[in-house]
Each structure stands twice: as structure tokens, then as C-alpha cells.
Image (cartoon, helix red, strand yellow):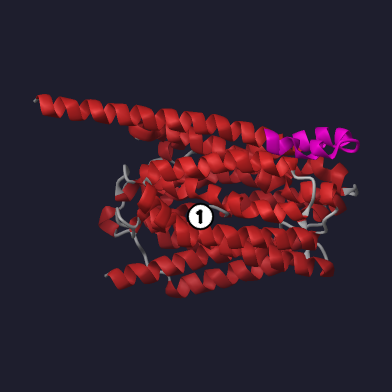
């Protein structure tokens, strides 16, 4: 049984890795593709980047709760396979997209089918124990990290052959992953553990409202949203920031993101489980979020391009936050609710990805005229992100303190009885 669980874990991590390769491949070329489609310079087209990225997130926000609830009803395997097939076909569509409008439509379709992460996370929750949960959720981040080693590196290297070529390669990876999963993926949720599908719990508003079912740590959903929102500065502005301030090419962006992937893979794959086990989930989350506050502000202050590589490793330690929080909250959910729970997390991520890119790119676009005289203004989105992460840190510590006080009161009452 343990061997089967290990094999299933390895497969799902490979699935997540290949999925992230497909997503990472297109990142270095996306600014150039948007500029080409809109017939503007990269700096001028930055005002369109936010809406293009937000379109993907908006559709994922709408469909992630549906995907998560469907996986609780029909099992993880068919939902993962459906998502992979849809993503692969959509990348082919985006390769042929003739204009910016069609590119936006393609991103919308990507968002509809891009919820495989929700079901993959639920799959891992199914096969995890109390002792392995935090480590396994950390491995999700590691798998994404490895994917972002390979994906952006490939995207940067093939960008010389045309800005659309990365989409064709992404399609290959997604469709190959679908075929691999169709042959080898086993179901993780037994039929007798599945629950009835309820539409009121399968829409984004209903999904977010389900946080009330986790009263002990409901405040952590707010913190998670703030952290995800702050992270959008890195996810949506990194390429524009480095190209504008340091004169990087798509190839340089791809290499830098590959190094980000290496560092995140090492921290989340090799260290997060050890750190959580040694420090505990709450202290590990505190370390991760404190690191994020300092690093995001630091990125905005960096005067030389080579320093971006120096700050990547401490930035990777901020990734400890996610597996720590997911482990805490998922321990409160039943096995047939893990899909719904991961759908809530994905909805929060998607909501942040709807608001974040538009907000952060708006700040970058507005700060660009001032940056021509004082380059530090290029870092404005990262300063805002640092402030948001700091608010999240304060809320998180308040939640942990409140839970600790309530636990002490319950302990005192048991002794009195």
C-alpha cells in the first residue's frame, strides 16, 4: 500500500511538473507577443499585460470550485485528464491566434482548463498522512520549481525562432502528459468516499463562503489571499521590470526564472518538510512570510541586474509559507472535502491573479515616466507588494495568537472538570 502511494505521489508530481513546464515556457515571450499583437513597444504594451494575465485568472476563479467539487463527486483521475487535454488543445489554439483579441480568448480557455492543480493537490491530500502532509505539499512547490527550471529556460532559448514557438512546445508537453496520465494514473478517491455534487458549493462565491466551515483557521484564508496578491508583483512584473531597468532579453528572463525554479525546487523539495518538522507549521509559515516581506522590497531597490540572481535564494525561502498553511488547514477537512478545500485555495489564487496583474502592471505603467529620471521607480510594484505582505504577516500572527489563546482556555477548562 505504501509503495502504491509513493508511486502515485511521484506520478502526480511529474504531472504538476510537466504542467508548470507548459506554463513557464510562454513567460519569457509573453511581453514580446503582446507587444507584437498590439503593435506597440514592450513598455507601451505593458498596460495590456495585466488584462491578458487576469483573463486566465478570472476563468480559473470561475471554474476551479467546479473542478474541485467534480473531483469530490467523480474522482480525481477523470478531472485531471480532462484539464490536461483541454490545456494542450488550447496551446495549439494560441499558437495560431492572429490578434490580441484571439490571444485573450485563448487565455480564457486556458483558465477554464488550467485547474488541474486543484485536483492534483486534492489527490496528494488523499494519499498523505498527518506526518507526510506538509512534506508532500512542499513537494508540490518543488515540482512547480523544477517545471520553472525547464519551462522558462526552453522558452527563452526558443524565443529566437519566433514568439509563438513556445506555445507549440507547451502544447506538446500538455498533450504528452495527458497520454501518460491516461495510461498510468490511478484513482485516489474510493467510490464510497465520494459525496453528492452541490451546485451551491461549486461556484466561486459559494466556494469562498465555505471558509466558514474552517473556523479555527479561517483568518489564514485572508492571509493566503494577501500573500498571493503580493506575489503577483513578481509573477507579472518580473519580465517587464528586468527588461526595462536592466535591459534584459527574453533569453535573460528565461535563465533568471530557471534559477528561481532551481532555488524553489531545492527549498520546497528538500528543505520545507525538514523545516516544518523541526520548527512546526506556524513558525515555518512565519519564517516564509517574513522573508517575503523583506525580499519583495529588496527586489525593488536593486540597482544592478546581477543582484537579481543574489536575491533569488532568499526569495525561495518564502515558498515555505504555502505548504505550512495548506497542511494546517487541510488537517481540518474530511477526505471527501479535500477537492473542495483545494478549490477554495485555487479560487483565492485566481482572485489574486485577477486583481494582482492589473493592479501591479498599472503601478508599473504609471511609475515608468518617473523611472526614466530615477530608475528606482521601476520597483514601485515591489514596494507595494512588500506592504501587502506585511499586512498579511500581522494578520497571520494575530490568528496564531488567537488560536493559541483559545487552545489554552480549552485546556484549562478540561483540568477544571
- Quarter of the figure with the N terminus: bottom left
Say left or right for 343 vs 128.
right
Q: Position of residue 188 (x, y in %)?
A: 35, 62
379 magenta-colored = yes
Q: Give the residue drawn at x 60%, y 49%.
A: 315
Left or right, 401 with respect to 59, comes to: left
Does residue 366 appear in the picture of this structure? yes
Determine whether the residue tagged by mark 1 lies in a helix, strand or loop.
Answer: helix
- Residue receiving disc 1: 117
Q: What residue lies at 63% left-to-right and 64% top-to-bottom? A: 149
Looking at this view, is 381 or 44 the one in front? 381
Residue at screen point 88% across, 34% down: 369
* Extent of the magenta region: 363-383
Q: For residue 21: magenta?
A: no
Magenta part, dominant SS? helix
Residue 230 image position (x, y, % from top left) = 61, 38
Q: Percent from the top left, x then y, of residue 144?
A: 55, 59
Determine whether, in the image, residue 64 is placed left or right of residue 2: right
Foreground: 76 or 198?
76
Residue extending farthest to the left is 417
Residue in the picture at 33% in, 30% down: 403
Structural crowding at the residue carrying mark 1, measured as other residues with C-alpha within 10 Å and reported as few (<14), some (14–19) or many (≥20):
many
Does residue 88 show up? no
Amino acid at each position: 500500500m505504501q509503495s502504491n502511494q509513493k508511486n502515485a505521489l511521484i506520478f502526480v508530481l511529474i504531472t504538476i511538473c510537466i504542467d508548470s513546464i507548459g506554463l513557464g515556457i510562454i513567460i519569457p515571450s509573453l511581453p514580446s507577443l503582446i507587444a507584437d499583437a498590439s503593435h506597440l513597444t514592450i513598455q507601451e504594451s505593458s498596460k495590456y499585460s495585466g488584462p491578458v494575465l487576469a483573463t486566465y485568472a478570472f476563468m480559473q476563479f470561475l471554474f476551479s470550485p467546479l473542478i474541485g467539487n467534480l473531483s469530490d463527486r467523480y474522482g480525481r483521475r477523470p478531472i485531471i485528464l480532462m484539464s490536461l487535454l483541454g490545456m494542450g488543445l488550447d496551446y495549439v489554439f494560441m499558437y495560431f491566434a492572429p490578434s490580441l483579441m484571439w490571444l485573450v480568448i485563448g487565455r480564457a480557455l486556458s483558465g477554464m482548463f488550467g485547474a488541474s492543480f486543484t485536483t492534483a493537490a486534492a489527490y496528494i491530500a488523499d494519499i498523505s498522512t498527518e506526518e507526510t502532509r506538509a512534506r508532500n505539499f512542499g513537494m508540490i512547490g518543488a515540482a512547480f520549481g523544477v517545471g520553472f527550471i525547464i519551462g522558462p529556460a526552453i522558452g527563452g532559448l526558443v524565443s529566437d525562432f519566433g514568439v509563438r514557438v513556445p506555445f507549440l512546445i507547451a502544447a506538446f508537453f500538455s498533450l504528452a502528459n495527458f497520454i501518460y496520465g491516461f495510461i498510468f494514473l490511478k484513482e485516489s478517491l474510493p467510490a464510497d468516499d465520494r459525496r453528492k455534487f452541490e451546485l451551491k458549493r461549486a461556484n466561486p462565491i459559494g466556494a469562498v463562503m465555505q471558509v466558514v466551515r474552517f473556523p479555527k483557521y479561517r483568518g489564514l484564508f485572508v492571509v493566503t489571499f494577501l500573500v498571493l496578491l503580493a506575489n503577483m508583483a513578481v509573477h507579472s512584473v518580473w519580465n517587464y521590470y528586468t527588461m526595462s531597468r536592466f535591459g534584459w532579453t527574453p533569453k535573460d528572463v528565461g535563465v533568471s526564472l530557471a534559477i528561481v525554479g532551481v532555488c524553489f525546487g531545492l527549498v520546497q523539495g528538500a528543505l520545507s518538510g525538514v523545516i516544518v518538522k523541526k520548527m512546526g507549521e506556524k513558525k515555518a509559515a512565519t519564517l516564509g512570510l517574513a522573508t517575503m516581506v523583506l525580499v519583495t522590497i529588496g527586489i525593488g531597490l536593486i540597482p544592478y541586474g546581477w543582484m537579481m540572481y543574489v536575491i533569488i535564494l532568499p526569495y525561495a525561502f518564502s515558498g515555505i509559507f504555502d505548504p505550512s498553511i495548506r497542511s494546517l488547514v487541510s488537517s481540518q477537512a474530511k477526505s471527501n472535502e479535500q477537492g473542495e478545500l483545494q478549490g477554495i485555495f485555487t479560487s483565492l489564487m485566481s482572485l489574486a491573479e485577477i486583481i494582482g496583474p492589473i493592479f501591479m502592471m498599472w503601478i508599473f505603467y504609471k511609475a515608468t515616466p518617473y523611472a526614466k529620471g530615477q530608475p528606482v521607480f521601476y520597483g514601485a510594484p515591489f514596494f507595494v507588494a512588500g506592504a501587502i505582505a506585511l499586512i498579511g504577516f500581522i494578520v497571520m500572527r494575530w490568528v496564531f495568537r488567537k488560536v493559541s489563546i483559545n487552545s489554552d482556555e480549552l485546556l484549562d477548562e478540561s483540568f477544571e472538570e
